[in-house]
Image (cartoon, helix red, strand yellow):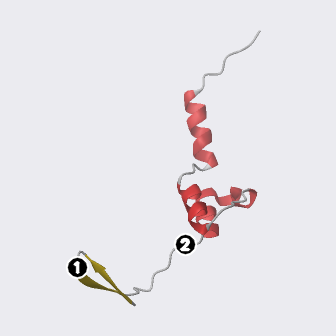
Amino acid sequence: MGLVTIHGQDWQITDIGLRMLTPDELLRAQFGRFAADYVLVGTQAQKVAAIGNSVCPELAEALVRANVTIRSVQ
């Protein structure tokens, strides 16, 4: 527990028993079978931000396939 003061008013902070996912857990949730292929560097906050800004490979592939026209080259 802790006590913080915001704009002159005291607030008590209590632990509600929840925990945040670790970067490894987030990576597995986002990338599934591809998670083992990724090595993240940086602080825990930087790793979480990188995962949060990422696009899973299946979605990236679907977007490319939907937006690229195959042209035959002669």
Q: Is residue 16 left or right of residue 55?
A: left
Q: Residue at x 60, y 22 (%)?
A: 69
Relative to 66, residue 2 above or below: below
| Residue for badge 1 | 8
Relative to 15, residue 28 above or below: above
Q: Is residue 74 left or right of residue 61?
A: right
| Residue for badge 2 | 21
- Neighbor class of circle 2 (other Cα within 10 Å; few <14, some 14-19, many 20+) is few
Q: Residue at x 26, y 84 (%)?
A: 10
The mark lying in front, picked from 2 and 1, is 1
Q: For residue 6, which quarter of the picture?
A: bottom left
Residue at the right extreme, as displayed: 74
Viewer-proximal residue among 38 and 12: 12
Q: Which mark is residue 46?
A: none
Q: For residue 21, which quarter of the picture?
A: bottom right
Task: Give the quadrant of the N terminus.
Answer: bottom left
- Neighbor class of circle 1 (other Cα within 10 Å; few <14, some 14-19, many 20+) is few
Disc 2 on helix, strand or loop?
loop
